[in-house]
Image (tube, rainbow, N blue to C red):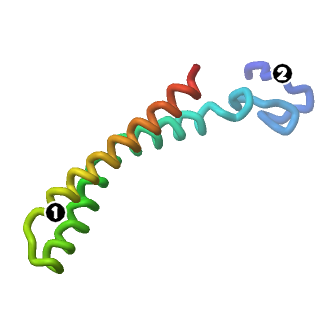
Amino acid sequence: MADDGNTDGTKGGAGGSQGAPSGGRGTLGDLVKAESMIQLALALPAGCLIGALVGSALDKHFHTGWIAVVGILLGAAAGFTQIFRTASRYMKRDS
């Protein structure tokens, strides 16, 4: 059996931090990065979809046909804003 540095005969017990990354940020940090990337991927389509749905509802209410287009454009602008905020926060955290 390989020597794992424990003198009490236990494997990876309370005495050692075997396999644990320093500060506990290894796997959790990777998950946070993955969540940020998923958020970036969903921001623009979600904004456009919400804008289209709200604009379509307003089009039906006011009997017009142009509010949905404005809703999509506003949703896209909101999505790009969210992407910029998330990306700048991510870049600031790395440097």
Q: Quadrant of the C terminus?
A: top right
Residue 32: percent from left, percent from top:
54, 40
- Is residue 61 rendered to the left or right of residue 33? left
Find residue 81 and report its image quarter.
top left
Residue placed furthest toward the right: 8
Q: Position of residue 74 (x, y in %)?
A: 27, 53
Above or below 15: residue 47: below
Disc 1 marks which residue?
68
Asked if labels 2 and 1 touch by Cβ distance under 8 angstroms, the answer is: no
Q: Position of residue 24 (x, y in %)?
A: 70, 35
State the separation of the CA atoms marked 1 and 2: 66 Å
Check disc 1: other Cα within 10 Å, few if <14, some if 14-19, many if 20+.
Answer: many
Badge 1 element: helix
Task: Residue type at mark 1: give it.
Answer: Ala
What quarter of the picture does the N terminus occupy?
A: top right
- Upstream in sequence: badge 1 or badge 2: 2
- Which residue is found at the position 83% from the left and 21% from the top? 5
Q: Residue at x 16, y 64 (%)?
A: 67
Identify the mark at residue 5; answer none if there is no mark.
2
Residue 95 marker: none
Q: Residue at x 20, y 74 (%)?
A: 57
Q: Nearer the viewer, residue 75 or 86?
A: 75
> Amino acid type of disc 2?
Gly
**Residue 17 is at least partly visible in this image:** yes
* 1 vs 52, nearest the viewer: 52
